[in-house]
Image (cartoon, rainbow, N blue to C red):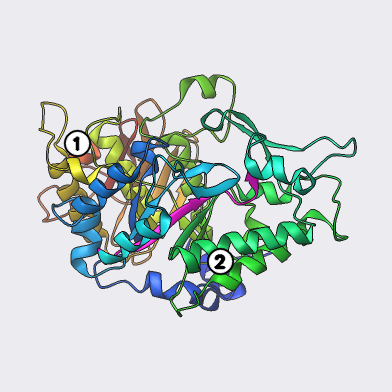
């Protein structure tokens, strides 16, 4: 069908109506029932700080500290009475494909970790890649018949990941025993361990083509059947609701089941990844590529999906992002997504000092939250700047009170404004120092915007 609308918000409203957005997100109401002043689902995830280098001690330290200082999760979510997730990411498991707690790193087991998170009043979260397994996993060795194979009988490669030792294989979702295995895995995570937020990664592996050895049907049919079985665990046996974040997921096949979805490439604590850019990797993890995806799929947010733009950064250590870049990441995520997660180490919050060219983590967090409060619960339209760099965008709020430009390019650019920027003398209307731009005044027209930054007027 062809939809015609006079403007961005009219189109968004028509899409929301067409896709019955209100009903689509009912199962996530408990997670998205936010108090006034909080726009997004949010919390903490361990990945973009510790990566796979996690254990009971590291997770326990972050968990113990998360309520003890002014870190972003505590200041923006917990103290305002909003639900907050505490999610343990990749690194907890024995091996990809063997979804048991690593005996050395998590000797107490995952039920203990979920209980500790729950005791802090947070939502226990866990990362899984349910359709993948390493060739040397116990599951692959014990059940070679579960592997998806090609017409020559060889296991189908579903990806390559250096963190996992190289190639990874995938399960044959057409097999009843594989379905039973996955049902047992989710029953364990939800009902035995007690996790209430599951980040399901690399879901594309459920749609990989192969010579299916079980039930008849195409890959999409097997995928849909398994996704529906997963939703059987959207409520635990004790009645507690469970949320699913789908990642690496084909949108069309996944949105009907798990609309809380990562909206693009992984972010990173660096602006770019030059080596992957050199070989033309379009889905390379980087702050820039992640924001480009979030902007490009903003129309889907709160219509077809609740977009997860990935984490934001407030820390000063273990990152090369400048303050203006971190601010751009945070504001872009808030304007065009429905979830704000952070991976900064709560146990180290407040230990960094400001310098000539960088705020401390405490100062940056305070300013970012102040600006998020100025944006409020407004919706934002975004479009690429006409006749300018393809990496320059305009944005504006639905009520017309806030507008500005985003420059993801590496050079000074301009965006065309239909009206003159507000006077810097007007209270609350001048660009922030974090916007990395002068409070220029003048006639409507081209407004300069530095590289890797944004301008906000009217907030």
Say which residue label 1 marks: 438
- Residue visible at 53% across and 73% down? 21
Residue 104: x %, y % from top left = 41, 39
Q: Nearer the viewer, residue 8 or 211?
A: 211
Q: Relative to 281, say whether 59 is above or below.
A: below
Say which residue label 2 marks: 187
Q: Nearer the viewer, residue 221 or 338?
A: 221
Q: Relative to 413, say whether 149 is above or below.
A: below
Q: Residues within 10 Å of mark 1 (few under 14, many from 20)?
A: some
- The Cα atoms of the two marked residues, 1 and 2, are separated by 55 Å
Query: In this view of the protein, can residue 168 be seen by the observer?
Result: yes
- Residue visible at 50% across and 44% down? 293
Query: In this view of the protein, can residue 6 be seen by the observer?
Result: no
On-image quarter of the C terminus:
bottom left
On-image quarter of the N terminus:
bottom right
The segment highlighted magenta reads 120-132
- Residue 380 figure quarter: bottom left
- Residue visible at 54% across and 19% down? 278
Secondary element type, mark 1 = loop
Q: Nearer the viewer, residue 161 or 341?
A: 161
Residue 121: x %, y % from top left = 26, 67
- Residue visible at 62% across and 50% down? 203
């Amino acid at each position: 069908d062809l939809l015609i609308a006079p403007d961005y918000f009219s189109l968004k409203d028509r899409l929301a109506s067409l896709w019955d957005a209100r009903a689509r997100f009912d199962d996530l109401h408990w997670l998205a029932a936010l108090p006034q002043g909080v726009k997004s689902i949010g919390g903490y995830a361990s990945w973009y700080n510790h990566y796979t280098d996690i254990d009971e001690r590291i997770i326990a330290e972050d968990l113990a500290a998360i309520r003890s200082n002014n870190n972003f999760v505590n200041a923006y979510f917990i103290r305002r009475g909003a639900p907050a997730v505490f999610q343990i990411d990749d690194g907890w498991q024995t091996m990809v494909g063997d979804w048991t707690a690593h005996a050395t790193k998590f000797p107490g087991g995952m039920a203990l970790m979920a209980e500790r998170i729950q005791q802090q009043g947070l939502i226990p979260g866990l990362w899984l890649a349910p359709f993948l397994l390493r060739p040397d996993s116990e599951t692959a060795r014990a059940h070679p018949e579960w592997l998806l194979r090609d017409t020559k009988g060889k296991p189908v490669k579903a990806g390559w990941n250096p963190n996992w030792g190289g190639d990874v294989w995938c399960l044959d979702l057409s097999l009843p025993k594989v379905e039973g295995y996955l049902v047992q895995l989710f029953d364990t995570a939800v009902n035995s361990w007690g996790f209430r937020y599951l980040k399901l990664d690399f879901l594309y592996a459920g749609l990989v083509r192969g010579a299916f050895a079980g039930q008849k049907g195409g890959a999409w049919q097997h995928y849909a059947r398994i996704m529906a079985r997963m939703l059987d665990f959207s409520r635990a046996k004790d009645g507690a609701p469970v949320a699913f974040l789908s990642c690496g997921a084909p949108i069309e096949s996944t949105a009907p089941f798990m609309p809380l979805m990562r909206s693009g490439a992984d972010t990173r604590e660096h602006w770019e990844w030059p080596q992957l850019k050199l070989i033309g990797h379009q889905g390379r993890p980087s702050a820039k590529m992640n924001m480009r995806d979030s902007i490009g799929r903003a129309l889907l947010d709160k219509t077809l999906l609740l977009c997860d733009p990935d984490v934001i950064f407030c820390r000063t250590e273990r990152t090369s992002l400048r303050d203006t870049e971190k601010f751009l990441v945070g504001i872009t995520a808030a304007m065009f997504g429905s979830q704000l997660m952070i991976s900064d180490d709560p146990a180290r919050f407040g230990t960094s000092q400001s310098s000539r060219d960088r705020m401390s983590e405490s100062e940056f967090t305070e300013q970012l939250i102040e600006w998020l409060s100025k944006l409020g619960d407004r919706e934002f339209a975004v479009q690429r700047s006409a006749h300018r760099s393809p990496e320059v965008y305009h944005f504006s709020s639905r009520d017309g009170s806030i507008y500005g430009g985003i420059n993801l390019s590496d050079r000074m650019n301009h965006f065309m404004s239909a009206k003159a920027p507000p006077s810097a003398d007007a209270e609350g209307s001048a660009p922030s120092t974090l916007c990395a731009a002068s409070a220029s005044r003048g006639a409507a027209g081209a407004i300069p915007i530095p590289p890797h930054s944004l301008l906000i007027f009217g907030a």
